[in-house]
Image: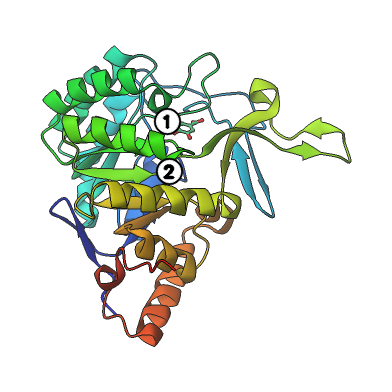
């Protein structure tokens, strides 16, 4: 079955890709994504200067999911700007994930990375792991100011990666901001910020930065991800494409995201745990499921969730 989809006019050969942060920091990792069956190559969120990130251990996987506090380890935007033209040779979209340590950084990076012509830019408003820096996505005034400024310098399709919201009022208010800015797609959700995992045996936290607090991912966040995909799909009446992220481990999880309104999904925790072969497995599982249910393509089930 053809699992390709189109987002903001860009064709993805399969409706799944790595989530920003998962196996996408170095040239080698990005090229490996290019050779894999990932439907796109998404870069690590980049900052102005290269960063080593937070001290280790900074990622911990457990049966329900994962917790991380990587602290934006990345090569710096100049390195990604040089790499992007090469990565486009793999024949799938290249998505540049843009972050920053202050508002001006986002503009500097967005302008330069836009000039290197990625297929899409994902503006990350939701990194939870920089000590002393709150997630921008939880400050709507700051988010609107920043998005309006990056919007002016970005000419390729621009999306925003949002943190999870837990109240319908926040979905509504955020949607109004996005509407005013004029965004081409949404990526939902970033990790559920500042969770805490405890090892009762050792009586310790499991990651070192920030006293053990970190972003949660994997199966345990799937209902939060689905809720955000659904809520924003409804806010925009299905007219703004959504990339769903959170808790995708199987073809059925992808199907659930599609039903809620996602056009494609990103995979983080399961990619880190299972490696690049996960894309082959997910594609067989999704194709078999859609076939069994009589859907001819991923696009055919987007937003088709029934209410009781
Ligand atoms: C990191 C984590 C995130 O969830 C994010 O959006 C950006 C960066 C990190 O710790 O590197």
Give the Cα separation between the discs numbered 1 and 2. Answer: 9 Å
Residue 281 visible somewhere in the drawing: yes
From the image, tell me which residue sits under label 2: 189
**Residue at left offset 35%, top offset 38%:** 161
Q: Quadrant of residue 47?
A: top left
**200 vs 27, nearest the viewer:** 200
Mark 1, Cα crowd under 10 Å, few <14 / some 14-19 / many 20+, is many
Furthest-front residue in view? 308
In percent of width and height, residue 199 lies at 81, 39
**Residue at left offset 16%, top offset 35%:** 182
**Residue at left offset 12%, top offset 24%:** 152
Compared with residue 243, is residue 163 higher up or lower down, i.e. above or below?
above
In percent of width and height, residue 70 lies at 54, 31
Confirm if mark 1 falls within 8 A of ligand 1. yes
**67 vs 91, nearest the viewer:** 67
Compared with residue 9, is residue 112 higher up or lower down, i.e. above or below?
above
**68 vs 143, nearest the viewer:** 143
Element under disc 1: loop
């Amino acid at each position: 079955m053809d699992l390709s989809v189109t987002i903001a006019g860009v064709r993805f050969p399969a409706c799944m890709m790595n989530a920003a942060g998962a196996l996408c920091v170095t040239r080698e990792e990005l090229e490996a994504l290019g050779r894999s069956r990932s439907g796109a190559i998404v870069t690590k969120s980049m900052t102005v200067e290269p960063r080593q990130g937070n001290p280790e251990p900074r990622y911990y996987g457990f049966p329900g999911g994962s917790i991380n506090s990587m602290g934006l380890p990345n090569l710096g935007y100049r390195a990604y700007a040089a790499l992007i033209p090469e990565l486009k040779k793999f024949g799938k979209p290249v998505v540049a994930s843009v972050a920053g340590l202050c508002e001006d950084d986002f503009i500097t990076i967005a302008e330069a990375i836009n000039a290197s012509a990625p297929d899409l830019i994902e503006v990350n408003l939701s990194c939870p792991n920089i000590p002393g820096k709150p997630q921008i996505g939880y400050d709507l005034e700051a988010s609107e100011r920043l998005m309006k400024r990056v919007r002016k310098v970005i000419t390729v399709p621009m999306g925003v990666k949002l943190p999870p919201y837990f109240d319908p009022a926040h979905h509504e208010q955020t949607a109004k901001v996005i509407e005013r800015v004029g965004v081409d797609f949404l990526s939902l959700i970033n990790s559920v910020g500042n969770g805490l995992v405890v090892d009762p045996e050792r009586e310790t936290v499991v990651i070192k930065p920030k006293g053990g607090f970190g972003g949660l991912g994997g199966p345990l966040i799937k209902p939060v991800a689905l809720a955000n995909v659904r809520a924003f799909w409804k806010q925009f009446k299905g007219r703004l494409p959504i990339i769903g992220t959170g808790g995708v481990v199987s073809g059925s999880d992808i199907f659930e995201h599609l039903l809620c309104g996602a056009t494609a999904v990103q995979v983080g925790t399961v990619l880190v745990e299972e490696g690049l072969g996960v894309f082959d497995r997910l594609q067989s599982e999704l194709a078999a499921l859609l076939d069994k249910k009589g859907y001819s393509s991923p696009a055919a089930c987007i937003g088709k969730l029934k209410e009781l």
